[in-house]
Amino acid sequence: MTYVFPPPPRVALPVIGNDALFPVRRVYCVGRNYADHAVEMGADSREPPFFFSKPPDALVAGGGDVPYPPLTGNLQHEVELVVALAAGGAQIPVARALDCVFGYAVGLDLTRRDVQQRAKDKGHPWDMAKGFDHSAPIGAIVPLTASGHPAQGAIQLRVNGQLRQNGDLGQMSWKVAEVIANLSTHVRLEAGDLIFTGTPAGVSTVARGDLLEAVVAGVGELTVRLI
């Protein structure tokens, strides 16, 4: 097969304990999936899960130096447990949803909050607040054989050594199996899909030069320097 120009390289992530890479298909994210974060963002009850997407090439495998994005004066961090799927389907029952999971990773959903707020105020989509270049740093995937299904444990983020987010996976409003099942009613999921599962309270503004250190118990760590 020939192309009018060379196609971009396939986005893939390293897997702990495996020389083979995890090929990424799509990147989905869950909004307001921790009650305390929902409250700080203006919601006051357990809402049905809602979803948005980031392009796969927004992933920054392994973290490290991440460029501060243009067109924002209010970049914010959101530490998240990321689910990596090895199988999918449509209308997946909750009871079978975890059978689709390959493993887990630590991720950061970087958000241009001012861009998002302006879009919300106008009733516009806020893709450019979430899906910009380098907006999704992510650590290596930990396979189930090493992580199991983490349902409890610390999910934290420090900025320049100061603890900003300090939650527990048990605080998720919608658990991983429920998220997978619900998302599969909207789209057909497939192997290679990633799901960022939401963030606890404590999101805050970060600046150029800041060091972000994310931790999810039983899954791993991720360090990012904004440059």
Image: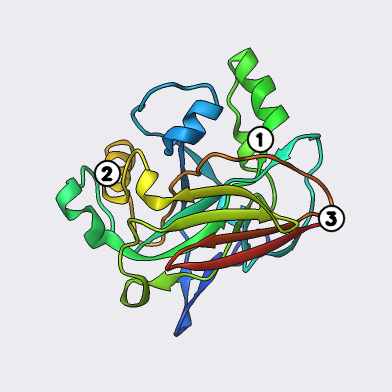
Name the quarter where the C terminus is drawn: bottom right
- Marked residue nearer the N-terminal end (2 or 3): 2
Look at mark 3 in the image and give the residue it sits on: 209
Asked whether disc 1 touches disc 2, contact meaning CB atoms under 8 Å apart, the reply is: no
Q: Which residue is mark 2?
A: 178
Side (left or right) of 87 relative to 80: left
Q: Amino acid at mark 3?
A: Gly
What is the residue that sits farthest to the top in this orientation? 122
Q: Position of residue 81 (x, y in %)?
A: 46, 55
Q: Earlier in the sequence, mark 1 or mark 3?
A: 1
Q: Position of residue 125 (x, y in %)?
A: 58, 25
Query: Residue beneath label 1, please?
Result: 128
Q: Nearer the viewer, mark 1 or mark 3?
A: 3
Q: Is residue 33 above or below residue 89?
A: above
Tell me the SS state at disc 2: helix
Of residues 175 and 100, the one nearer the viewer is: 175
**x then y, percent, for residue 93:** 17, 46
